[in-house]
Every structure is written in structure tokens, then in C-alpha cells.
Image (cartoon, helix red, strand yellow):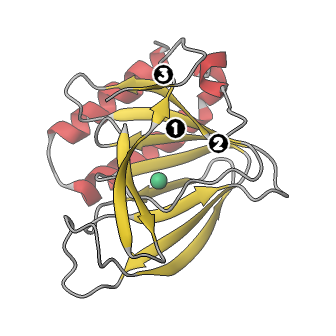
Amino acid sequence: MHPHLETFQSDCADVVAENSGPSEIVRRLAPQMRKLLRAAPEFLEPCHRLGRPDQYARNLIFAGHDDSLSLFTLVWAPGQWTPIHDHGTWGVVGVVEGVLEEQSFVRVDHDVDAHRDEGIELLPGGLVLLPPGAVATFVPNPDHIHVTGVPANRGPVLSLHLYGRFLNAFHVYDKAAGTRHLVEAEHTEPGDDVPRRVA
Ligand SMILES: [Fe+2]
């Protein structure tokens, strides 16, 4: 792994090991992500830039041995979007190339129960446009819910996504039905050229 990535992973592991809580973790890791973005031209390899014609692509850069961290590149062609989803952990996002769009959603059902899969009421929240060099963070409250992607009339995007676990599955929400279900997400491992699903 490139020395920039080794340093970043080590710094992240140190912050997480202090166990100071999600908001403090992302507050401390956001500047580290900004620094990593500046070094991206030096450490990004062809396997990190793999895209997909059918959906946005997730390419793993590293995952911690103890499941406490993972860093992916996400590669977006114009018109590619996530479904409405959550993460089950904190996250730090940095944009390398292009302008990434994020639409947040807020859970407004009464007596919000983080483990309930029905009776979920979502309202659209704010929207942000993240240009190259931008860093955004989120924490579970009880979970951060959003849609991310690129409109069809905008250029492609490459972004870095750091999570507080190995993010291989997340809830996808059906806003109209008020439900959600767990979805396993495909990704490429370092050096792969075909996406795989890792349970
Ligand atoms: Fe997300």
C-alpha cells in the first residue's frame, strides 16, 4: 500500500482507538481526509478508478483487521445514484474529481426505533454540492440517511469514503412504503477488476 495510505490508515486507527464517540472521530478525521485528497494523484491506482455501466462502483482501498474501518473509492458516471440508504456507522467523504451531490433525509416517525424496518417516515432534508477538495461527514443519529450521486448533465465523479466499519451492507429505504431492508453491496478488492460480494 502507498505510504500516504499507510499513514492515513494508522492515523485513523489511532483516533478510533481512543473511542471518543462518532462526532469527535469525524471532527478529527475530516482534516486528515482533506490531506489525503491532496495526495490522491500519488496513490490512486487503476483499480481504484474502475467504474460500472449499470451502477456507481465501489472499490475497496483498505479495511482494518478488526472491522473498525474501511476506505473505498466510489466512481460515479453521470446519472448514477445510490438508493436512499444509511450506513450503520460514522463516515467521512472526500471528493477527488467532479461535483458530488448529496440529498439528506430526516426520519420523522414518532418514537424512532433504530431497529424497526416498517413505519418509517422520511422527509427530504438539505442538499449539498461537494466540489473537488470538499469533505463531508456524518454520524448515526440514529442513522444518517441520504441519496448521493451525479445528475445526468454533470461530469463524472471520483470520491473517497471512509467508514467506521467494513461497509459491505446497508439499509435501503422505500420512502413511499415506509420500509427498509438490508442490502449487500458489491465492491472490488484491491487489484480486482470485477466486483464481488463479500458477506
Ligand atoms: Fe452514503
Name the residue beneath numbered marker 1: 35
- Residue flagged by tag 1: what amino acid is it? Lys
Image quarter where the C terminus lies is top left
Name the side, left or right, on which 193 lies relative to 92. Answer: right
Name the residue beneath numbered marker 3: 4
**Of 191 and 80, which appears nearest the observer?**
80
Q: Relative to 111, does residue 142 appear above or below in the rendering?
A: above
- Residue flagged by tag 3: what amino acid is it? His
Mark 1 and mark 3: Cα distance apart in space: 9 Å
Mark 2, other Cα within 10 Å: few <14 / some 14–19 / many ≥20: some
Name the side, left or right, on which 20 lies relative to 77. Answer: left
Q: Earlier in the sequence, mark 2 or mark 1?
A: 1
Residue 152 picture quarter: bottom right
Q: Relative to 177, does residue 86 appear above or below in the rendering?
A: above
Residue located at (63% from left, 42% from top): 56
Name the residue beneath numbered marker 2: 55
Q: What x and y, as percent, mark residue 184?
A: 39, 40
Q: Relative to 158, does residue 93 appear above or below in the rendering?
A: below
Q: Earlier in the sequence, mark 2 or mark 3?
A: 3
Mark 2 and mark 3: Cα distance apart in space: 29 Å
Residue mark closest to the camera, 2 vs 1: 2
Residue located at (71% from left, 55% from top): 150
Q: What x and y, as percent, mark residue 8?
A: 40, 29
Mark 1, other Cα within 10 Å: few <14 / some 14–19 / many ≥20: some
Tell me the SS state at disc 2: loop
Residue located at (55% from left, 46% from top): 94
Q: Is mark 2 within 8 Å of ligand 1?
A: no
- Residue flagged by tag 2: what amino acid is it? Gln
